[in-house]
Image (cartoon, rainbow, N blue to C red):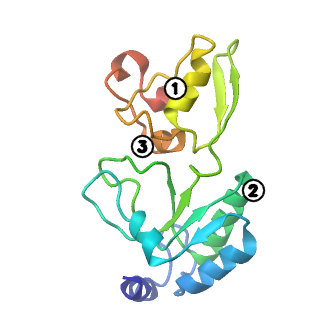
């Protein structure tokens, strides 16, 4: 619950990772985010419940969920969270099987607005994508040039490249094609 989260953060007093004093008020964090970014901000119980789980058994209710409009919005959301001492959890489709995409943090979901394949360069065999791009969307664009992205997790129809990078996803052909880290 938020009450427990507030009490725990008050007792800790400082983020061990950043050394930044923790703000005891999710409400002030939400207000600061609303003033600072153009993207969608959801601190309501329903949205938080939706983002409390992934494809695993784990459940961690986030502080709130942010859908940045663009890269500048994402960077500003990170800055606001840093000032408040709030942890941030970038999240893709939430297909993780071991709880990697749920935590008591501000969830930064790029799958809604930052989901474009920006460029496929067949000569250099490179692609530039935004973190919310779904793997199959990248593959369709690459296949036009007889290329692919090697890692092939079972959730390829919905998993995002940002999530794959965060989890170092692989799949059944990883011995041949490598894991995500081998292809980024």
Quarter occupied by residue 144: top right
Q: List the residue tagged with mark 3.
A: 167
Residue at x 56% of width, y 23% of height:
140
Residue at x 38% of width, y 36% of height:
155
Residue at x 48% of width, y 74% of height:
63
Percent from the top left, x then y, of residue 105?
Answer: 47, 68
* Quarter of the C terminus within the rendering: top right
Quarter occupied by residue 59: bottom left
Instruction: Bin the neighbour count of mark 1 within 10 Å (Cα to Cα): few under 14, some 14-19, many 20 and up.
Output: few
Camera-near label (2 vs 1) is 2
Q: Nearer the viewer, residue 52 or 5?
A: 52
Q: Earlier in the sequence, mark 2 or mark 1?
A: 2
Q: Residues under labels 2 and 1: Cα distance? A: 26 Å
Report the disc number at residue 72.
2
Q: Of helix, strand and loop, which one carries label 3?
A: helix
Determine whether, in the image, residue 107 is placed left or right of residue 40: left
Report the disc number at residue 183.
1
Instruction: Bin the neighbour count of mark 3 within 10 Å (Cα to Cα): few under 14, some 14-19, many 20 and up.
Output: some
Q: Earlier in the sequence, mark 2 or mark 3?
A: 2
* Quarter of the N terminus within the rendering: bottom left
140 to 67, vertically: above or below: above
Percent from the top left, x then y, of residue 6?
Answer: 44, 86
Percent from the top left, x then y, of residue 120?
Answer: 68, 23
């Amino acid at each position: 619950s938020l009450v427990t989260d507030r009490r725990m953060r008050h007792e800790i007093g400082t983020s061990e990772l950043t050394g930044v004093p923790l703000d005891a008020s999710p409400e002030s964090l939400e207000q600061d985010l609303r003033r600072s970014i153009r993207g969608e901000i959801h601190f309501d119980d329903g949205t938080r419940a939706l983002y409390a789980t992934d494809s695993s058994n784990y459940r961690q209710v986030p502080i709130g969920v942010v859908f940045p409009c663009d890269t500048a919005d994402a960077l500003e959301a990170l800055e606001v969270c840093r000032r408040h001492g709030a942890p941030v959890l970038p999240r893709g489709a939430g297909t993780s099987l071991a709880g990697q995409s749920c935590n008591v943090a501000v969830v930064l979901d790029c799958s809604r607005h930052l989901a474009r394949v920006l460029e496929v360069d067949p000569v250099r065999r490179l692609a530039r994508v935004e973190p919310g791009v779904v793997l199959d969307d990248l593959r369709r664009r690459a296949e036009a040039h007889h290329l692919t992205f090697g890692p092939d997790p079972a959730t390829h129809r919905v998993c995002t490249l940002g999530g794959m990078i965060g989890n170092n996803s692989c799949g059944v052909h990883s011995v041949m094609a490598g894991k995500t880290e081998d292809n980024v």
